[in-house]
Image (cartoon, helix red, strand yellow):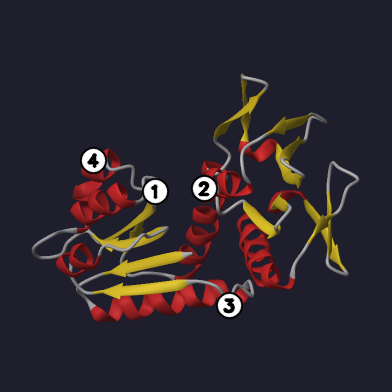
Amino acid sequence: MNILICDDDRQYVDLLNKYVTSFFRNHNIPDYNIYKYFSGEDVVKDMKYIDIAFLDVEMDGINGIEVGRRLRQKNPDIVIFIITSYMGYLDEAMDQRVFRYINKPIEKPAIMRGMQKALALSYKKAMGRIVITVDNREIVVNQNSIICVVATGHSKYIYTDDGNIYENSESMAYWKDKLDDNMFVQTNKSYIVNISYVNSISDGRIELNGIKEKAVLSRGSRKELKTKLLMYHASQE
């Protein structure tokens, strides 16, 4: 999870950094990055892939609205907070699909609530439709209905929460790239699981709601799975 904070007032950058860090620590989420900037020009020069951005709207040079527009070109699903003491930019911000206004002076409860809702929105966006090719037929399902993808021999089996199992010939690399990275984890070479269906983990096996088969969890995937589970549960509180 990549978070960006940009304000030409260092006091607000430091305060937002403190509050966002507190949010992740309170939810025991270790895997996140916070990038701090003090001008829109610096953001545009660096232009990282950002998941959530806090942008001061009233900066000299490139303002927060324009910074948000350029960040959205990099990640169309970015969640943008506008930090301001002046509501005159509201119409322009709405045109850029700004998620929320945060008024100055900034209060911690507003940031904590905003982060929780921003994560929830990220997972909601991850529920988009996906096409599964089965015997030259294209079947459209929502990603959130996919419990897991299982590789057996040359075939891949997509389990969904309505009890269907779709056989598909695409590679696991294809499915790992196709499925939303926030919602799915490849737990070993033969399994990709939807974290929202994880019921329990024990002895290298993952029990999934909706199917009897248990997925295998490799040592190398444990940290990623744990981090994404923590992030997901933080978004559901």
Q: Nearer the viewer, residue 237 or 138?
A: 138
Mark 3: amino acid? Arg
Q: For mark 3, give the secondary structure.
A: helix
Relative image position of residue 122 (x, y in whole percent): 51, 50
User: Tag count in the figure?
Assistant: 4
Residue visible at 29% across and 41% down? 94
Of tags 1 and 4, which is closer to the observer?
Answer: 1
Of pointers 2 and 3, the one earlier in the residue sequence: 3
- Tell me, yes or no, whether the two marked residues, 3 and 4, touch with CB atoms within 8 Å: no
Q: Earlier in the sequence, mark 1 or mark 2?
A: 1
Residue furthest to the top in view is 137
Report the quarter where the C terminus lies.
bottom right
Answer above or below: position of 33 versus 209. below
Kindly indicate the quadrant of the structure image that contains residue 167. Answer: top right
Residue at the spot of label 3: 25
Q: Judge left or right: residue 175 versus residue 99.
A: right
Mark carried by residue 91: 4
Q: Which residue is mark 1?
A: 99
Marks 2 and 1: in contact by CB < 8 Å? yes
Question: Label 2: which residue?
Answer: 121
